[in-house]
Amino acid sequence: MNGSLLLENKSDLIKELLEASGIHSGMHKDPETAYLVVHHDKVVGLQGLPGLEVEPQEKSDGIHIRFLVKAGTHIKKPVYLCFGMMQREGVQKILMDVTIEKRAKVNIFAHCTFPNSMNIVHRMNAEIHVENDAHYSYFERHIHGDEGGISVYPKAKVVLEEGAHFKTEFELLKGRVGLIDIDYECTCRALSVLEMMARISGRGDDVIKINETGHLLGKSARGVLTTKIAVRDKAKAEVYNTLTAGAPYARGHVDCKEIVQDQAQAKAVPVIEVNDPKAHITHEAALGSVDSKQLQTLMSRGLTEDEGVELIIKGLLR
Amino acid sequence: MEVLQLKNVTLTINDNHILHNINIDFWNGYVHAVSGPNGAGKSTLASTIMGLEGYREIQGDIIYQGENINDRSVDERARLGITMAWQDPARYEGLTIKDFLMASAKIKNEDNIRDVLASLSMNPQQYLKRALDKTLSGGERKKIELASILVNEARLVLLDEPDSGIDVESLERIFESIRLLKKRGTTVILITHSLAVLQQADHAFLMCSGEIIDKGEKEKIVKYFENKCIPCPHKNIPDEWEPAVGK
């Protein structure tokens, strides 16, 4: 859609949602900024741009969104997607069908905001197709309440055609995680580039499950899976990162770092598989308490142990 | 007047005396050097004074400004006015040099931090935003460590091998910083096996095998170190070794 849709009686709701998301509330008044705002199961704000088609449909099984960037289109400013609920309870289901056509380029800032969550389920199922030499960057920030009554299920199946570039970054640092179960899988053709990163901080009885998979099937495809997690109290984190390479000169790296405090638990299972003698994949994983030398250095400058740990974790999750 | 005293300090790890019956007085406002060959126990002594993890279970007493600080934690000792620069400083993923220096600074003032970096020939514009990680060279990281000591404004500073990894040009900057600390009235303890660093001290101690074997003016210690420790007869020609203590 080119043009804007703002439900007049929803303007306060949009403002409230944007503010809770940390987005400048004037964003939706900028005619050069595309956005989509979904509150619970309703589309409350929408603005497209030439070359960008955003078509949401409210259906009984959730919000269906067709998101398409036409061939050769470069969207200069980030496109804002805001999914959220201001109420305490409910289910939000988003089904996204994303196509970034050849040589197109777009950056998405997605905010999933549930500041008052007590009993909320948020499901996101995305099918993403990034065509030849197209660039798709998706930054997703979650903002949850302090009670932890939320379950989040982000799922994505991604196909990168030759020369395509896909970068996704998932951040959940504010509020309680509750339960999060990420499941992303990406198939990479020749010369394509995949970058997946997740940064999550869990506490209380939060449960973090991450399952990220990349298949480097094309010649010279590259992929990096990065996970940075801090868990404290009785929180649990399980990370399954899988990267396979099945073509000459495919290159990949899996990196998982988890800081564990109190009675929290962390598990990392990196799986790397190479099926071509000219391919190369590496991995590194580090799980445990904060580095003693880092902490003692900060303490020798006068920071308490808690202050030192906070600063080290802040750095890791940055 | 002494600011720090070690009285009969012994540190035993796995039944080995790493430090043995150490008795030292560090005078207020002086630049002291603790010198000796590799493995003498110099860095262990610094870690014990700082109260680092693994170096707290000692016999004897560490007295700082008249107070026994044996039971004080690292951060408590830091807040009393003691700090330490590591021989091989830690690196931090995600933190910038500015983050680290602001955390270290007594007065959280960016202008002050910029001045300190400039005094070490480090362009603040270039360095403040840089990550404090493995992208920095050993020498750069070492200078950042020293910058953090300067902005910390502690009363007693332990510098463990301050010249390691430092190029010749930067070495004079390091020495200038040591002189600046002295000018401020800070007590400095240099942990070193370098004669060039030893020359910066007013007074020196010589360590060997976990013991203090000599002390006095730096010229005397330099002479002993040159003649008796390079090479070390204690290890290489035991029959020729004559400890200086008591002579």
Image: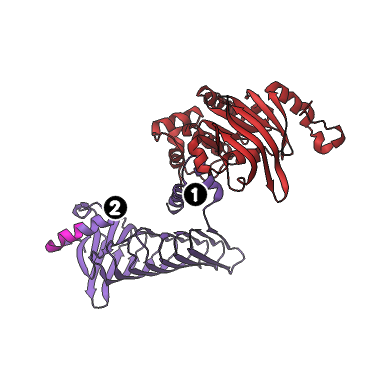
Q: Quadrant of residue A131?
A: bottom left
Q: Quadrant of residue A84?
A: bottom left
Q: Which residue is mark 2?
A: A77
- Would residue B46 be visible to someone looking at this image? no
How many marks are shown on the rendered structure?
A: 2
Q: Badge 2: few (under 14), some or many (20 or more) residues near its Cα, within 10 Å?
A: few
Q: Nearest the camera: A15 or A145?
A: A145
Q: Is residue A226 magenta?
A: no
Q: Amino acid at mark 2?
A: Lys
Task: From this view, report whether residue A288 is shown above or below residue B167.
Answer: below
Q: Amino acid at mark 1?
A: Glu
Q: Is residue A176 left or right of residue A226?
A: left
How far apart, in angstroms, are the residues tagged by discs 1 and 2?
Answer: 30 Å
Q: Is residue B90 left or right of residue A90?
A: right
Q: Which residue is mark 1?
A: B93
Report x, y in % for residue A127.
36, 70
Report x, y in % for residue B79.
48, 38
For label 2, the SS is loop
Report x, y in % for residue A185.
44, 69
Q: What colour denotes chain B? A: red
Q: Is residue B232 left or right of residue A245?
A: right
Q: Badge 1: few (under 14), some or many (20 or more) residues near its Cα, within 10 Å?
A: some
**Chain letter, purple in picture:** A
The residue at the point 47 percent across, 47 percent down is A308
Q: Which mark is residue B190?
A: none
What residue span does the magenta drawing correspond to?
Answer: A6-15
Q: Nearest the camera: A22 or A156?
A: A22
